[in-house]
Structure formats: structure tokens, C-alpha cells
Amino acid sequence: MRNFNRLGIFFTAFTAAILLGQASLAAQGQTAPAKPPAAIHTASQQDEMDWWKNAVIYEIYPRSFQDSNGDGMGDLNGITSRLDYLKDLGVDAIWLTPVYPSPQIDFGYDISDYRAIDPQYGTMADFDRLVAEAEKRHIRIIMDMVMNHTSDKHRWFIESRSSRTNPYRDWYVWHDGKGQTATSPGTPPNNWQSYFGHSAWQWDPKTRQYYYHKFYIQQPDLNWRNPKVHEAFKDIIAFWLQRGVGGFRFDAITSLYEDPEMRDEGVVKDAAGNPEINAYGDPQLDDSRTNNQPGEHEAVAEMRAESDKFDSKSFPGTRLLIGETYLPNIAELAKMYGTAQKPEFQLPMDTQVAIINKLDVPTFRSKLTDVETGINDHIPLLLFDNHDNPRIDMRYGDGIHNAQIERVVATVLFASRGASLMYYGDEIGMVTTPPTRKEDVKDPIGITGWPKEKGRDGERTPMQWNNEPQAGFTTANPWLPVPPSAAEINVEVERTDPDSLFNWYRTLIRLKKTVPAFEHGANIMLDTENTSVLSWLRQAPGMPQVVVSVNFTAQPQIVNLQAGGSGLAAGKLQTLLKSPGGVDPKSLDQIVLAPFGIYIGELQ
């Protein structure tokens, strides 16, 4: 839910896929991994239980992925029709943003019924078919679970606002205003703000109190101090797990609780001591009373305990819980895994890495070291992109080398230890295409914050499949316009180009799944004084070591991976992957990288 760029304070049969990947490598003059078929093993029960530890998770924004019925909007049957594509890419799980019934004020994150499918996306039968077809391809479906708030059209809230004595009244956060009288609402209870602009309090004239909404006015926050709310969501989780879903991504989880004393938040000030002003014209607040408050860990542990009760005939082992965890430091992220006695998320998102938003080697090195050493041997979940922030091109690109830079980011994502979360279209390099006129904006954030805040439409444009009208997304007028970039940036074009970003992604994912050090190895930083090239070692006991070097600059670089006491012995390198036009290094101490060049090699 949060926008981690704007808010700041945020992968035919498998054998065929291998053969395609080898052909791609050969066409690029690259060397395939030594004996790749031998690296593939029959999945054991333990592998199944640990599936998420090296997983590739693919976020789909359903409205924008594939339209199956010609209404201009993506749907569940459209996703089902593209499952073979996702299997070929190497995807282990699909995270769907909300497909529940909703007034669509926040495009599904305002939920009016947690136990149904919105008709614009299809039917429950369509959903069951998606789950079944995905399961045949060994892909799990991850649902979005929004527990911080509901739609104001949800029956719980309709009851809650009907009277102060209604049994659902305390399912939400209600409070009198400051200076409120019999004839005046006074002012909001405190200075808390909505993430989407202006006061987080909305006056309700019927019951004469304010209700709290951390997001839109139409998204009232639930009161997590009420045990009935906890029980309701445990029942909802059970409902979907019984339908065979593989788990949940928990939205806005650090916003569940607020300061019970209702104290004002601090105002962020600039170097001169003046309040900083955000895109909505409001003073920037520090989130100190409405984010990461006591209680959230206990609530997540409850949901994990409920999830752990369920199993699947096809997928034995744990169901996956992912957390949207925007936190200030690695120590706070570590807490989101819970304890052995009270586990929480298997994969809280590492937004420490996600919000770097610049190609800076020391920062990347520092943040990747943090997640390697600071989460108590848990599994990291790395990501760089999602539906709430401008795409990679806008946050990391320089306008000249964007395709090369996309390779750089993808390499960090898939060649590092842990699970990887990607956003639809990243694999072809879809670009951010924001509206140019306020009248074209669909996202209410953009309507409220224009022109400083143009909203999130630019990162939610339709998936670009081919050169047909509307890029093969729909036969109708799409809900958001297909960008002009679709003529060159699309799956059909890139699939046949051995040097394309798509084939880079597919090869990286194959390496992630078949090279033992990538499957199991730790990350160890190399050449740590280098400010231009990020290099690291993937190492697991008894397995060949793999080195990765990534040039973060537009200038050629020569790297010595034996520098700085790395302890790496001189040895022959077997190239696993290199940038188009790259050269095979003769030794560890002289790896030549082109601008934004990449080298991945296995020590023999």
C-alpha cells in the first residue's frame, strides 16, 4: 500500500526451458553453467517445505496484466491464460493485488467483502481454476491481505457508523474532536495525517465523532485493540487457505496500531528549522505515533499460527506469509520474523534495499551486508519494484543506459541470497509512463497532489505482450493507456532477441534455481573499498564458489577480486553469465567490465 519511493519515511517443460536458456547463452557468446541438467534434482519433501527460501515471486496487478473478455481491464482468466509464460520465466508464486469486491476507490485496497471475488475480475469459479492451473505448473497463488482498514462500504463499517451503540462501533477507531460541542465538531483529535494527503480524521455528522483513516477517507482503519477484529481475520485467512492459496502478502502491516494516548506526531524540519512540506501541501510528519507501534507483532504471530494449521496435498509444508514492512532499520526488520516460539513472517520485505533509489555501490554494499548479517540467519526477501512506486527506469535509470542499468538491478535481485520479488513487466523493462494532464489521472493520489504528485498510474500501465493493437493486453480501450514504448518493449520482441532484458531475466532465474551456491550459499562482499563496482561471493559448504561483479558506472572498470584480503585462491573461472559483448576474465585479479557490465563466474 505504501509508496516506498514517494513516501520515503518505504520464472513446455522445465527441460525445454533449460534448452532455451542455453541457446540464449550461446547466441550471446556466453558460457552456460557446467553440466546444468545435473544441477537439477528431483524435489524432495524438504524442498517443498523450503520452496520459498529461494523463490521468485511475481507481483501481478490484475487490472493491468491480461484482459480475457474485451472490457479493457485485466482479469483472473487473463492471468490463467498466461501461466505458461510465467512458468517459462521461472516464477514460483504469483502475488495478486486485491481481487475482492471493492468500490475501487483505491483499486481494490478498499475491500467491501473479504470472502468473494469482484465481478470485474471474474467469479469464484474463475479463481479456483486459476489456483488449480497454477498448481499444475507448480506455481502458488499469494493473496493480498489488507487488515489495516476496510472500505467504508464494508458491512462492518456500515454498522459501525450507524450508531454509537452498535456492536460494530468499536471495530473501528472513533474519537471526539478537540473542542467539540453539541453544535460544533471542533477540530480533529490530533495532527495525524493520511498517507494520501491531509488529515487522517473524518467527521461523521450522524454519530458526531471522527473516524481515523491512515489512507483514503473511504478506507477507515480497523481497531486492532478489539479481539473480535483478530478473530474475524483468522476466519478470513482460513477461508482462503481452504481454497488452496499458497499464502498472503500482508498490506500496510506496520500501520495496524496507533498510539493509544492519541499524541501528536512530530513535524519533520529542514536544515533551517522550517517544517518540510509534502506534495499535498501538508507538513511532513515523522510517523512516530501511527507506524510500528506495540501490538503488531502479536497480531502477526496470531495470523501465522492460523496459517500454520493448513497444509496442501500438492504443496506440503508451510504456507507463506509476506509482510509489507517499511521500517527504519535492519533491527526492526529482524523483529518481523518473530521468534521460534512465536514465528511471524517467513518473508518480510527488505525495504532497506528497496528504497536505495540510486546506483551507489557503498550503500548497496552496506544494505546487502545488513540483511546478510542482521536478520538472525533468516531468509531475506529482496525487491526493487511494485505497484506503488515509479518503475526501475525512473528511479535508477539515467535516460541513456536504462537497459544496461535494468540488468544491474536484476542481477542484484536474483544473484543475492534469498527470495526475490519482482513486478510484472520488469522482465522486459517496462517504463514508467505517468499522465501528462490532470484530467487523465485515475489514481486519486494524483488528483489530490497534482502536479507535484502525479499518482501511481505511470507504474500500472498494461502489460506489453506484442506489437498488436493495445500491446496484446486487450481488444478494447484499456483502462490505462498502453505506452508508446510498447512498440519496442514487449515480450514478443524480446523473447527472440538473445541480448534482451527478458532473456537476461530468464537466464538469471535459471542460474538462481540450478547453481548450488545460488540456491544455498551465503553472500560475502568482495573488493569492499571499490566505489564503482559491487562484487560478492556466493559460497556454500562443499559447493563450488561463485563470484559476481556488477559495474555501477558508465565507465569501463577493471576489478581485482583478490583485493582487500578476500582470501580467494587463484583459480580458473567458468563463466556462467556475462553482459552482451563482455569478455571472459583470465584471472580473479583482472575482471574487465564494460559500462554497467556484469560478470558471474564459478571458481573451478
Image (tube, rainbow, N blue to C red):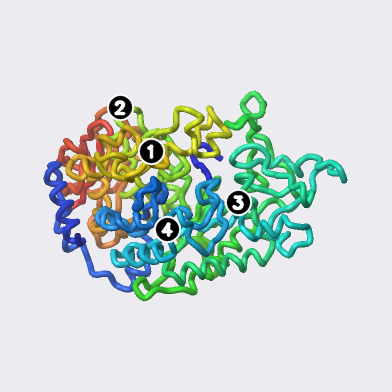
- Residue at 21% x, 63% y: name it: 40
Q: Position of residue 514 (x, y in %)?
A: 24, 58
Spatial CA distance of label 4 from label 2 is: 41 Å
- The residue nearer to you, when weighing 204 against 85, is 204
Going by the numbered disc 4, the residue's amino acid type is Gly
For the residue marked with disc 3, what is the amino acid?
Ser
Q: CA distance from mark 2 to mark 1?
A: 14 Å
Q: Residue furthest right?
A: 182
- Circles 3, 2 touching at the beta carbon (< 8 Å): no
Judging depth in this view, the residue of 445 and 227 nearest the camera is 445
Q: Which residue is mark 4?
A: 122
Q: Position of residue 15 (x, y in %)?
A: 17, 61
Marks 2 and 1 in Cβ contact (< 8 Å): no
Residue 431: percent from the left, percent from the top? 35, 36
Instruction: Classify mark 2: residues with Cα within 10 Å, few (<14), some (14-19) or many (20+).
Output: few
Mark in the foreground, 4 or 1: 4
Pointer 2 residue? 400
Task: Label 2, secondary structure: give it.
Answer: loop
Label of residue 392 in the image: 1
Element assignment for label 1? helix
> In front: mark 3 or mark 4?
4
